[in-house]
Amino acid sequence: MTSSYLRRDLLLSLAAAGSAAMPGRAQEPSAAAVFDVRSFGAAGDGQRLDTKAIQAAIDACAAAGGGAVYFPAGAYVTGGLILKSGVHLSLDAGATLLGSTRLEDYPVTRPSLRSYTDNYTERSLIYGENLENVGLHGQGTVDGRGAAFKGPYKVRPYLIRLVSCRNVTVTGVVLRDSPMWVQHYLACEDVLIHGITVHSFVNANNDGIDIDCCRRVTISDCKIASGDDAIVLKSTSNRPTSQVTIANCVLSSRCNAFKLGTESNGGFENIVLANCAMYDTRLSGLALEMVDGGVLDGVSVCNVVMRDVKNPLFIRLGDRGRPYEEGGSRPGVGALRNVRIHGVDATGASRIGCAISGIPGHFIENVTIRDVSVVFEGGVDEAPDDVPEHPDRYPEHTMFGVLPAYGLFCRHVRGLRLEGVSTRFLKPDERPALVCHDVREMEVVGCSFAARRLAVRLRDAEGVWIRGCRLPQPVPLFLDAESATDVSLIGNDLSRAREAFRGSGVFAAANRAGD
């Protein structure tokens, strides 16, 4: 059964979205392949349960070879829907999918692929597995009415869950108030999420977008405000998440704006985040965390502005060692390497400071931070010099307490380059701007560190090159390297330091000294 509302504009936009996700392989629906849910008996009155009618439209669309399941303006109450290959849900302006508030209206769905998310969910509002060429589009809204669900993970459905699907497009829609994660894409390929709005704060675990063990994903021009992480990349099975690009998004979260990791079994490869704005975020703006094995190799972040983000940067290699499936063997320590962060401007950072921290015997490797400016709260008179390792603790920027540096604390890192980094504080702070413990092969180039007593402290550091740096205000001592070796201090403007350095392992040349 087809609708009399054969809207060519819907079909063209849907085809364009599919083509963008998988050039040359999208199937353009014909003008006849539009299935109006009202023609299948959907009331759209905000009261009657329309699940059967909507599912009938999906099934008919799939049987006809694919097309658009069209929702005209109205409020469609529905339980769990099972998506089919070739089917694109299209919500017109004024159309709202309202999730049923009864758990029994959501069928249990257990995918064939095993992952740690087996522990989290078995019900979803929109679910699909092993599908091709599917999507959700339009100017309408999907409202999960998540405040109605109370209790642990499995009694709170996801809004969208797609598993092992290919050529997925989600464009234009508003997604709000999920009972749990808003969107979960597990082991999917060729995913395009463009121009959507997410607003979800009504329950716990309200992640905005979860990309998990996926390949070839583009997220662009989205606005996401969520109670949990806004955009989070995971690897909850033995497959890596790879070839992911995130661009031109506006992010806000009561947790982390962009997080990569926590669950990291399969690892991460070739990840890019660019041209994003982050605001009103309680935890980290950028959190890169590897604690369950796996390899993170190749992450690039550029052109990010943060306002009122408590922790601009947190990078952690740990050893929680949680297997992704019940009874699995404990994974060993993973690896975190080849990270490039360029062009970050952040204000509103808390007094805790930022950390880049591996664990003893396991270095974070090859991290470059360039053209980054951060304004911290400051206001700490004294902080402990010995920071606990906590190798198996859940990773969070607060896990070490207030750090020895008001700016950047680096530990168990090899191949760190800081270039054009600027830090300052709003309240007087007695801590150094930069503190490094067990760091090897480090370059500090063209940086500006505000400080009151000491700008840089090196402990058990080796092979450090500091050049072209300056002090924006007077300080008694620029560099404390008394427990460091092979340190070169060359070509810095230290005219505002009463004393340039301490430490017998420092080679100093061509530095501008004070009067």
Image (tube, grey):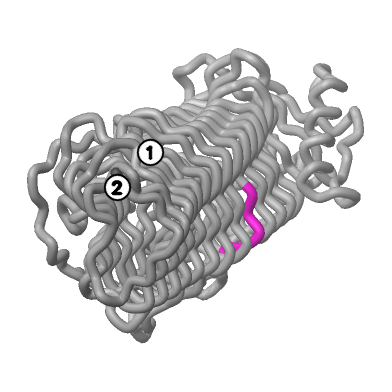
Q: Counting other residues with Cα less than 10 Å from the Cα at mark 2, is it few (<14), some (14-19), or many (20 or more)?
A: many
349 left or right of 225 in image: left
Residue 244 among those drawn in magenta = yes
194 left or right of 24 in image: left
Q: Nearer the viewer, residue 486 or 306?
A: 486
- Determine contact: label 2, label 1, CB under 8 Å: yes
The x, y position of residue 114, in whole percent, is 48, 71
Q: Which residue is mark 1?
A: 374
Q: Nearer the viewer, residue 350 or 369?
A: 369
Outermost bottom residue: 329
Task: Give the residue drawn at x 65%, y 27%.
Answer: 172
Residue stretch in magenta: 241-245
Q: Amino acid at mark 1?
A: Val
Q: Is residue 391 depicted above or below 409 in this figure?
A: below
Q: Nearer the viewer, residue 353 or 429?
A: 429
Q: Which residue is mark 2?
A: 407
- Residue 372 visible from this viewpoint: yes
**Element type at mark 2:** loop
